[in-house]
Amino acid sequence: MLNEFRRRNLDISKETHPSKPYYLHVEECSKFVNKVMREIYGYPEWLIAFALLLSEWHDVGKLLPEWSLNQKKRPRHAIEGAEWLLKENICAPYSELLAYFVITHHSPLYILNDVRKAIEVAERVKPRHFNSYSKCKFLTKIFTGLLKKMEKIARIDLADTIGIFKLADIMSARNLPIDNILMQYSWPEDIEDKLISGISRRAYEKRGDFDGFKFEKQMSIASSVERHLLVAAPTGWGKTILALIRMARLKPVKVFYILPTITAIRDFYDTFTKILDETYIGEYFYFADVELLKEYDTEEETPIDIYRYFIPKITLTTIDQLLLTIFQVGRYHVRRFNFKNSLLILDEFHLLTPEMVAGLRFFLKNFSEHYNLSCLFMSATPSPVYRDLLKDALPRLKIMILSNEYKCLRRHKIEFYDKRVEDMIVNKQDLLQKERTLILVNTVSKAQKIYKDLKEDLGSSRNIVLIHGDLAYKDRMEKEGQVNEADILISTQVAEVSLDVSFNLLITELSPIPSLVQRFGRVNRYGNVPCKTNIFICKPDRPEPYGKLLINLADENLPILLEDLERKGEEAYLNEDFWQYEQIYWEYVKKMEERISEKIDVMLNFFSFLASEKEILKMLGREETWIAIPKIYLDDALNLYKRLNDAKYEERRKIYAQIKRYLVSASRSDIKSKRVEWNEKLKLPVIVNYDKDIGIIRVD
């Protein structure tokens, strides 16, 4: 094709990217495409040929005389290039498909109506090479018919092929070393030896010993010949180690470790990088770029470009990012191909919303075989309903409940205290003065009140830390850095699954039984049978945020749980009666799955799904939240915002990431409060009642 361009008087040595001629950009794209598609994933030859053609064709519009790298206002080169391709009648296979992808290679895979709108906008731009884009307009009339002639799997592969090409385009345009990226698609030869020595070293650092018997058990489970495993094991048993060994044994192309909270992701990242070379590990969530800016100078390229596209060998991320990719929301098709031949690990899967389970089931039923996925689901409190729903989606799922490991554990001596947490704290001041204590309550307002009261009562005699979800990102990260040294930690549900820290004493409000079990797991994680009470459960003031049904069920079942713990040890946590309320989810999950399937079918399993944030939150079962900025950080954010006007693309992204450090999630009631202002420049609500020590103020 490049020779064909020359014959038609196009200069392929023209600079189309900073300090890079077109032919070199094409060579770099082609190298990546060929290596990934042919050698790593073994795609069909027609798709490889198609992707290589697209590598040569995608920026041909930049070779037309009206386009120049130095122009401030340039013609829409993607549409110009597609029109040139169709009008020149070059004998290229799949020319209509090529033209569509040339048009959309800087955008989501738009439905045809959106493509027509883009063409109409492009026709108002001057200068341009063509007076009208008649061929592109005609393409929008026939393209859906072309897609419908293809099988569903071919359309999925085609969208993923575009993702591979587009990743190559991005890497080359930003001068990221292609060989460094390709390195993430293979494993070091000595990976298993490194993992085993790292696990042993880490065990001695944390607990002073290495449990060889437990390690043999972990090795045995991880070495299972089954592709899909579901493992229920007690908190502190070593599910992380199990996951690491499973990675080493399977050696998948990629590993996706799905964790329930940002705190958990950060904690796992710290753990993993003490065992494995950080070169192969990345984390991606909304605030990931904020984290990276701590380590890399803002004037330099940051590896967020690699992390955000799921490039690292092991990606630590959230279920939201997994599902957004599955649903092909926006431009997420750029990274979905990375799921091929991968290992998917879902930790604490019982915390998924029913909507998330529906999305996961859709993915597993429609993609697991084609993508050759392996799955590992882990939980200390496995929901039997979710377990059965996953088994239904993956009939070959092997379920392993480690009953003996639960049975032999008696780490907790529990009392129910039929009064409020505040009363318990007053009565147990002597314990708070000498025991490392976790105080876990159901609402932020209660956590803030207890924090203020204890700071006043105990002064500087104890190191008291407060952590919850209503803190600005920078403040929450500072708080998390203080957790290991805290004498008393006061928290909400964020501490249930996010902390690999062991406390001597827990004072908690009553919550649903699975939630309580997670809370118990923060106490005496690696200890022996306690000689005195180390967990006190107190009566909540109100049922929020769980609701009366779940709190009443917990109240009814708590005596049964405590009696079972005395008789059976932690095997009591496996009592399926505690999960009966989830039976209502079964039909709901299936209905949600049908809706998702219908939506994807309408998009022909090809086009990108474009939706509002509200619609996405609903699909994920998330509560409606707003991003806001505390007033105390407004000036800092505005000073950064001023720099955007003169900033280039890369610098703009880094400035946005710096601004995100100051942002906080706010509820509907926060936004509607009289103590909220609006900043027109940032287009954000401003939280007036904010304190960096306690977050959005919910107590006077």
Image (cartoon, rainbow, N blue to C red):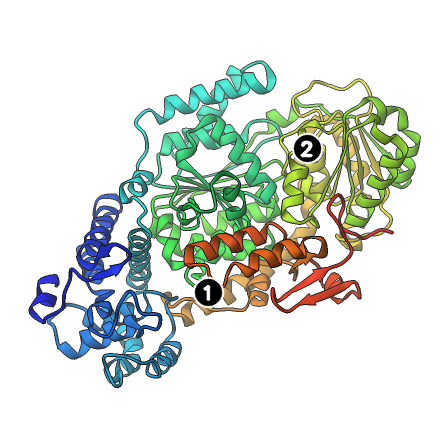
Calculate the distance from the C-alpha at mark 1 to the C-alpha at mark 2.
45 Å
Query: Quick check: can you spot residue 339?
Result: yes
Looking at the image, is mark 1 or mark 2 earlier in the sequence? 2
Q: Quadrant of residue 417?
A: top right
* Amino acid type at image mark 1: Ser
**Rendered location of residue 198, percent (x, y):** 46, 22
**For residue 482, which numbered disc appears in the image?**
2
Kindly check if marks 1 and 2 are in contact, taking CB atoms under 8 A apart as contact.
Answer: no
> Between 396 and 227, which is closer to the camera in this rendering?
227
Looking at the image, which residue is at 23% across and 82% down? 130
Residue 372 x %, y %: 34, 46
Task: Name the outermost residue toward the left.
Answer: 7
SS for tag 2?
loop
Instruction: Give the left or right position of residue 689, taking residue 425 as reference.
Output: left
Q: Residues within 10 Å of mark 1 (few under 14, many from 20)?
A: some
- Which residue sits at x=40%, y=28%? 223
Label 2: few (<14), some (14–19) or many (≥20) C-alpha neighbours in 10 Å:
some
- The spot of residue 184 in percent (x, y) is 34, 39
Task: Between residue 334 and residue 563, name the one nearer to us.
Answer: 334
